[in-house]
Amino acid sequence: MTEEITKITMYADDEDTENQPSIMVPIDDMDIVKSDSPHTVDELAQELATIKQSAKKIAIIGSRNLPITHQQMIETLSMALVMQGNTIITSGGSSGTNAAAIRGAMKANPEKLRVILPQTIGQQPSDVQDQLIGVPNIVEHSDRAMMTLADASRVCNREIIDECNQLICFLSHTSKTLHKAVKYAEEGHKVITVFYLD
């Protein structure tokens, strides 16, 4: 079987091109993107464009059971992302990832925070209601009032992911709901950063 070779000539400058080295590159070794590949050129270009955007909609979701040091890191991350011009999208929470993301964004610029609740403010615990005081962009869902909180949260995570360009998720290996959210984001070709807590 013959191997197709292409010759690439490299020149250090425009003069003395006769004595310059050549590199032989086998074309068979080059990566080929097939049209039926799960990641087509268009999808990769879209993901690259998202990464290069100066201001993005970044979803931050994750576990409620976090030590205070992790919460402080998430708060700092959220604040820094907002200060760079990004919008943070998260859900309500009295503790853990979402609460830390809200605190950080509120310190930097409340207008750059969007909180999507699984149900209504009235259905949230009083400490969550207190935390949401002053948040200008809250989305409530009275249509989910009769759903269990677990089911409403799953739908809420999908809504958050649909609105974002990038997902940052803090979870443990046993977090089934969050793993499903990450998989949903992968299917939507979002830029994803996952931090495992265990």
Image: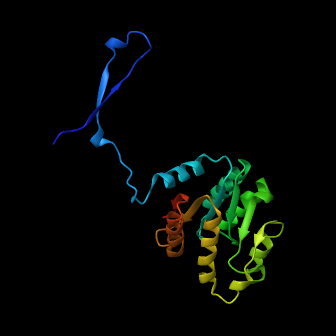
Pick the residue in front: 167 or 94: 167
Q: Compared with residue 117, is residue 10 higher up or lower down, i.e. above or below?
A: above
Q: Residue furthest bottom?
A: 146
**Residue 168 in picture, x, y percent from top left:** 58, 60
Q: Identify the residue at horizontal 74%, vertical 83% (top origin).
A: 142
**Residue 51 in picture, x, y percent from top left:** 58, 49
Q: Is residue 24 visible?
A: yes
User: Residue 37 falls in which quadrant of the image?
Assistant: bottom left
Total marks shown come to: 0
Report the side of 22 relative to 111 (left or right). left
Q: What scheme was used to colour the molecule?
A: rainbow
User: Residue 73 falls in which quadrant of the image?
Assistant: bottom right
Q: Is residue 68 visible?
A: no
Pick the residue in front: 67 or 4: 4
Q: Identify the residue at horizontal 44%, vertical 13% (top origin).
A: 14
**Residue 93 in picture, x, y percent from top left:** 69, 72
Q: Which corner quadrant holds the N terminus?
A: top left
**Residue 107 in picture, x, y percent from top left:** 78, 56
Pick the residue in front: 33 or 61: 33
User: Residue 61 falls in which quadrant of the image?
Assistant: bottom right
Q: Identify the residue at horizontal 69%, vertical 59% (top origin).
A: 88
Report the side of 96 relative to 35 (left or right). right
Pick the residue in front: 13 or 102: 13
Q: Identify the residue at horizontal 69%, vertical 67% (top origin).
A: 99
